[in-house]
Amino acid sequence: MITIRILAAFAVLAFALSAGAQQASQPELKIDSANRTLTVTANEKVDAEPDLAILHIGFETEPTDAKSAYAEGARTSNAIVGAIKQAGIPESSIRSESQYLEPDYTPKSHKFKLAQQWTVRTSPEHAAEILDVAVSAGANSTGEIDWTVKDEAALEEQALDKAAARAKENAAVLAKGMGVRLGALIYVSNQLSAPALPRPMVRALAMAPNAATAPPLAIEPHKVSREASVYAVFAIE
């Protein structure tokens, strides 16, 4: 019986600590006749055409001995970067993501392969052209694109402005409908997010004989979005 009472005491203590932790992370709003409040939540989304495309370009050599894999990788690496620069991309817009020489994990292979990845920043209208240039130069693990804008902060501010305005409008409408007068703002919080969008990877594992004369891929940029949520508590009179 003593053991059961001790366990029960610990359970009560744990519950109290958990409840205290939740209250510490959220504002405790005391609702009574002296503190009448109105709470609203508003969500808004803004879209913009992208003005920047971040291309993920890379290659992987065929499995061979380590020295040959490195030599072939060096040749391919320089050919890809050279072709991208010749297409008009400045060196400052090309950044290495990763490069490694690793064993080929095929059973009983005992061979190696070299892989390298870059990010290349360009305008959306040139994205397909640069991908085509890279693949023609030997990039066989290429195609993922991040569509974005140069001034992300401005887009986020627009989303917050719209959400804040919507929260205030909703509060005014709700107060009018309930027959009360909207008072001062007591508490407000916000949250920003970027919707997750699929980014397909195009892998050119083998070049067709007429690939050099084939037109670039038909790529249509998707819009850049930001979502904002505003939680507000107003006094009512």
Image (cartoon, rainbow, N blue to C red):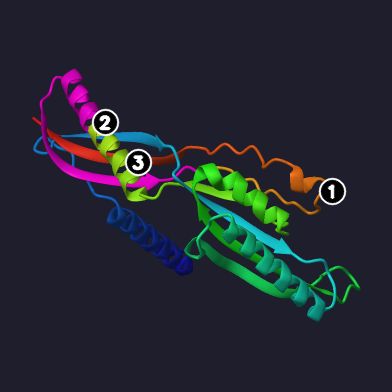
Residue position marked by numbered label 2 in the rendering: 166
Q: Is residue 142 visible?
A: no
The quadrant holding residue 138 is bottom right
Identify the disc placed on residue 209. Answer: 1
Q: Nearer the viewer, residue 30 or 38?
A: 38
SS class, disc 1? loop
The mark that comes first in sequence, 2 or 3, is 2
Residue 175 vertical position relative to residue 205 in the rendered view, above or below: above
User: Does dot 2 land on a helix, a strand or a loop?
Assistant: helix
Q: Is residue 172 magenta?
A: yes
Earlier sequence position, callout 2 versus callout 1: 2
- Which of these two is toward me, 227 or 222? 222
Picture residue at 89% right of the left edge, 72% below the top: 109
Amino acid residing under circle 2: Arg
Dot 1, crowdedness within 10 Å: few (<14), some or many (≥20)?
few
Measured Cα–Cα span from mark 1 to mark 3 = 49 Å
The magenta-colored residue range is: 168-195
Q: Secondary structure at mark 3?
A: strand
Amino acid beneath label 1: Pro
The amino acid on which the numbered mark 3 sits, given as a three-letter code, is Ala
Compared to residue 62, the image places residue 222 above or below, namely above
User: Image check: 187 left or right of 14?
Assistant: left
Residue at coordinates 20% horizontally, 39% vertically from top-left? 233
Query: Which quadrant of the rendered structure holds the C terminus?
Result: top left
Q: Mark 1 or mark 3, which is nearer to you?
A: 1
Q: CA distance from mark 2 to mark 1?
A: 57 Å
Marks counted in the figure total: 3
Identify the residue shown where x is 53% and y is 39%. 221
Which numbered marker is on residue 228? Answer: 3
Near-viewer residue (90 or 218): 90
Residue 114: quadrant of the picture: bottom right
